[in-house]
């Protein structure tokens, strides 16, 4: 090809490109993400009731594990809130075979990590290690699960540390706002108790910790998840059986009945003298992940306050300038859930700020969500969900949630499809059920002498001290 012909071809190509109309004011359309596909998975149950889930992931020479129990704070005795949390924290602080220091040294030696935490529904041991050291991590996991001894010195150290942490937490308005909105929405159910009290920490002792461990840490109340570069299946199962097969079944107490107050308008002011701003929560009883309303409610919550492009953020922060933070959250439990709209504002703008939040709630009830906004929200939710499953920790956490919450095995693989299936009409319907200010609780933490009169414009106000 000579230079003249080449030049002609380039000119024609340039003219063709220039004739194409490209609207550079709009971002390119985002293609729908493919549905998540779970890696190769094997499930079985040992004779003692321990459920085992094995998931292959050979991208890295690592193994991540979860040992999950239905043993969260909903099982705390009424006189001892924080017991599940304390049990989880102390499981790895000494056993009948290893003191705390030895556990820490062995974990460091194998390049591993092992810790436990408790939430409202579950108590979960979580760990990770280089694949070649999986047998040794399983040794430690079995030891802390079956033989935790709660040494007296470690219990005392925990009590001192937790007391100091609680003092610091109680100095924050957000602590009281979260504590009280849970108490108002869930009532006397244990879901309404988020944290220990100074009195319950003082009452905590080794006997109560052992009782809690023995009542909830049972093989027929557990699921063990191993994810990563696992040995061949039979070898992996042999490792598990050798450490857990002798673990005996237990009779388990039933969880508390899911009985909650009927949602109703109420206003609670937590008096915190000297506060120069008001910490606001508007809350309503919501649903668990298995409920038909969950996915429409998830999408509605994200539109309302689920990020920096949400309606609350753009209006209350960006447009009105009332607050630095304005968001909403949906926190599903196993048998219910909590929806909250959250902001913190200066005392002098409390009235217009509350009105602005309530107007955004009403707008979702009153008006269908525009197609572009709905599509963007679905892309955001789907993208975040799929990206969160790319890591071993992310996938292990989601698998533990599925098993603990009794969700179908298809939950993870159908998540994005169910998000994308949500319609504007469904959003309006769930907003009417769960967002209506007429049936929501309003909790505000602030200086009662300065903001009580403002709140009384919204209805009858009950005042409590922050103590």
Image (tube, rainbow, N blue to C red):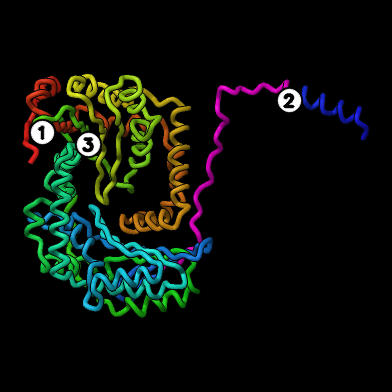
Q: 271 or 370, which lies in front?
A: 271
Please tell me whether mark 3 sits on a helix, a strand or a loop. strand
Image marks 1 and 3: residues in contact by CB distance under 8 Å: no
Marker count (numbered): 3
Q: Magenta-highlighted stretch: main secondary structure? A: loop
Image coordinates of residue 259 in percent, x first then y, are: 16, 47
Image coordinates of residue 176 in percent, x first then y, are: 15, 39
Q: Quadrant of residue 28?
A: top right
Reading the image, the residue beneath label 2 is 17
Please tell me whether mark 2 sits on a helix, a strand or a loop. helix
Reading the image, the residue beneath label 3 is 284
Q: 353 or 73, which lies in front?
A: 353
Q: Residue pushed farthest right? A: 2
**Residue depth check, mark 3 versus mark 2: number of the one nearer the observer:** 2
Q: Is residue 27 left or right of residue 376?
A: right
Image coordinates of residue 424 in percent, x first then y, are: 40, 30
Q: CA distance from mark 3 to mark 2?
A: 55 Å
């Amino acid at each position: 090809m000579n230079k003249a012909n080449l030049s002609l071809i380039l000119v024609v190509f340039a003219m063709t490109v220039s004739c194409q109309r490209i609207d550079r004011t709009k971002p390119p359309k985002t293609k729908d993400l493919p549905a998540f596909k779970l890696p190769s998975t094997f499930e079985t149950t040992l004779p003692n009731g321990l459920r085992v889930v094995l998931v292959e992931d050979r991208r890295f020479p690592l193994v991540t594990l979860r040992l999950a129990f239905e043993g969260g704070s909903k099982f705390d005795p009424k006189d001892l809130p924080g017991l599940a949390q304390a049990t989880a924290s102390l499981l790895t602080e000494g056993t009948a075979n290893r003191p705390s220091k030895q556990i820490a040294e062995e974990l460091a030696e194998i390049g591993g990590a092992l810790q436990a935490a408790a939430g409202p529904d579950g108590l979960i041991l979580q760990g990770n290690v280089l694949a070649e050291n999986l047998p040794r991590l399983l040794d430690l996991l079995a030891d802390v699960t079956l033989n935790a001894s709660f040494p007296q010195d470690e219990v005392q150290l925990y009590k001192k540390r937790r007391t100091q942490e609680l003092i610091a937490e109680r100095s924050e308005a957000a602590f009281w706002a979260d504590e009280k909105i849970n108490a108002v929405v869930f009532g006397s159910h244990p879901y309404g108790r988020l944290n220990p009290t100074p009195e319950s920490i003082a009452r905590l002792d080794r006997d109560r910790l052992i009782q809690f461990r023995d009542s909830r840490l049972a093989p027929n109340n557990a699921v063990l998840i191993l994810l990563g570069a696992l040995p061949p299946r039979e070898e992996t199962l042999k490792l598990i059986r050798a450490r857990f097969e002798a673990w005996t079944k237990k009779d388990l107490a039933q969880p508390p009945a899911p009985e909650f107050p009927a949602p109703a308008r109420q206003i609670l002011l937590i008096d915190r003298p000297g506060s120069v701003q008001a910490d606001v929560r508007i809350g309503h009883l919501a649903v668990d992940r298995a409920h038909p309303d969950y996915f429409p409610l998830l999408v509605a919550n994200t539109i309302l306050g689920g990020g920096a492009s949400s309606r609350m953020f753009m209006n209350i922060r960006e447009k009105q300038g009332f607050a630095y933070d304005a968001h909403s959250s949906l926190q599903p439990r196993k048998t219910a859930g909590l929806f909250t709209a959250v902001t913190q504002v200066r005392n002098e703008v409390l009235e217009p700020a509350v009105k602005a939040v309530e107007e955004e709630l009403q707008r979702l009830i009153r008006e269908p969500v525009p197609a572009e906004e709905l599509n963007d929200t679905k892309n955001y939710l789907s993208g975040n969900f799929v990206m969160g499953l790319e890591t071993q920790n992310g996938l292990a956490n989601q698998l533990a949630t599925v098993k603990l919450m009794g969700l179908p095995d298809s939950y993870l693989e159908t998540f994005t499809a169910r998000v994308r299936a949500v319609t504007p009409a469904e959003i309006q319907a769930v907003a009417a059920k769960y967002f209506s200010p007429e049936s929501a609780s309003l909790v505000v933490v602030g200086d009662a002498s300065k903001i009580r009169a403002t709140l009384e414009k919204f209805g009858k106000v009950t005042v409590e001290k922050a103590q």
